Amino acid sequence: MEYEAVIGLETHVQLKTKSKMWCGCANAFGAPANTNVCPVCLGMPGVLPVANAEALRLTVLTGFLLNCEIPRFAKFDRKNYFYPDSAKNYQVTQYDKPSTREGFLDFEFNGGISRVRITRAHLEEDVGKNNHFDRHSGVDFNRAGVPLLEIVSEPDLFSADQAHAYLNALTELLVRGGISDCDMEKGMVRCDVNVSVRPKGTTTLGAKIEIKNMNSFSGVRRALDYEIPRQIEAVKKGEKLRQETRRWDDLAGITETMRSKEDAHDYRYLPDPDLLPFTPSEDWIASIRAVVPELPLARKQRLIRDFNLPPGDAEVLKANDELGNFFEKAADGFRNPKAIANWVINGLSAQLAATGTTLADLRFPPGHLRELVELVESGKISTRIAQEVFTDLFTTGEAPAAIVERKGLAQVSDTGAIEKICDEVIAANPGPAADFRAGKVAALNFLKGQVMKLSKGKANPAVAGETLERKLQG
Ligand code: ADP
Ligand code: ZN
Ligand code: MG
């Protein structure tokens, strides 16, 4: 019998807010331990939390990005547990009434579009971090109270690679939306993986195994690459898998049992009595809906459809929001957007990289790039001269037509001038001229090259070729 894996992910991302969820402490990475703390995030008795409005806004915005329903009633609950990373002995989260629910995320995978349903994206607070030293352990509470979104997917993923693609698409979207910087190295994204196996063609879910402790997306993929065959082998041997939580050991490259369902925690969730239910107004929700940015995949599809770009170009422009915006402004209404895309993707990106600058430093507006392409298309300058003009445009910001004028770079299509150069070239290269006359067609390219060189690249190559041919045959 053939088996397939079924995967659902629970992804936690830190929200990009200035301050923490319930207090004014900085939401910042890398500060000395326990310097961004106060009585509220340390869980002192008698203090009261005040909700961070920006965190609420980012939560609802995420809901829109993930095509979710935004309930008009949500609430905060205490998840009770006893562990040193929480001074309060509970974590505030949203249990049965989350702020967003029932959405989906479309992303590219294996040459097609995959859709993963999103169960919910709910708001919760981060907890402290236990640090272990040689002779003692400590808790750093800088992270305690930092706003987190937990994004729960339905079990709609079927392979390690697909789960990996989903995570990339999800974080790309969150970065694009300004929800989170999703910097893995700073612990801004954490992901628990749930995986089961079942006979191919059946629909009943197998026993859910949750894997924890992956600290990169490639770790998620490797954990699944280990765990899926392990489960399939076990069921093939007739073993009955039971629901459990396993820990990924990155060094050993294996998962091992952490806790089984029997000792699963009972968190005794209860509504937080210090926090009012969250009942957003229609106006406020509408103001957020009004600023939902276009999703990366939607943009790629639009660039292909509206600008007739090849998928490879659209992918590059989708991956870099600013570059995509620049391209669209330059190509808007232009008959040959592909030519502009070439300049943006090759010329412009290369210059930015070479000079260590960004589009924000750019000296010229998008319209100048279109002007450059127009100069080439109308035959005013050659593509080779266009490179030179572009370098000038990049450093000075001067309009391309003005650069061409000032430096006398206009292509020479004037036959009189080209004839003169052709005569000189033929006289100076009797060998190749004779070769061409004897039927060696390639010799013409050499002579044409000489004409271009002598004209400093300004001769119209087509006119130069025709003129040479006419003179040599005549
Ligand atoms: P719990 O209540 O134990 O947290 P949930 O039903 O909320 O479990 O699911 C948590 C995550 O596990 C979700 O991402 C969900 O898609 C996934 N999941 C649930 N059941 C399975 C299963 N049998 N196999 C794979 N993933 C599953
Ligand atoms: Zn604080
Ligand atoms: Mg759950």
Image (cartoon, rainbow, N blue to C red):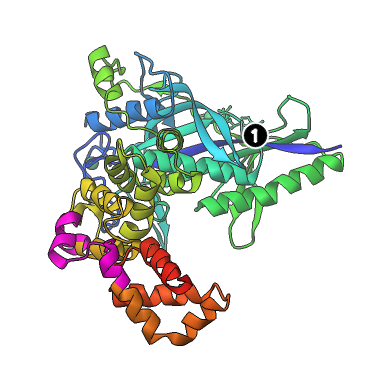
Packing grade of label 1 (10 A; few <14, some 14-19, many >=20) is: few
Residue 400 within the magenta-colored segment of the rendering: yes
- Along the viewing direction, whichever of 98 and 95 lies nearer the viewer: 98
Task: Determine the image quadrant of residue 150.
Answer: top left
Q: Nearer the viewer, residue 195 or 440?
A: 440
Task: Report if residue 85 is visible in the image.
Answer: no
Residue 328 in picture, x, y percent from top left: 31, 40
Q: Residue at x 36, y 62 (%)?
A: 463
Q: Residue at x 72, y 31 (%)?
A: 206
Q: Foreground: 146 or 169?
A: 169
Residue that numbered label 1 is attached to: 261
Q: Residue furthest front?
A: 474
| Residue at 45% across, 71% down | 474
Of residue 410 and residue 421, the one placed in the foreground of this image is 421
- Report the quarter where the N terminus lies: top right
Give the extent of the magenta segment.
Answer: 393-419
Q: How many marks?
A: 1
Q: Is residue 67 visible?
A: yes
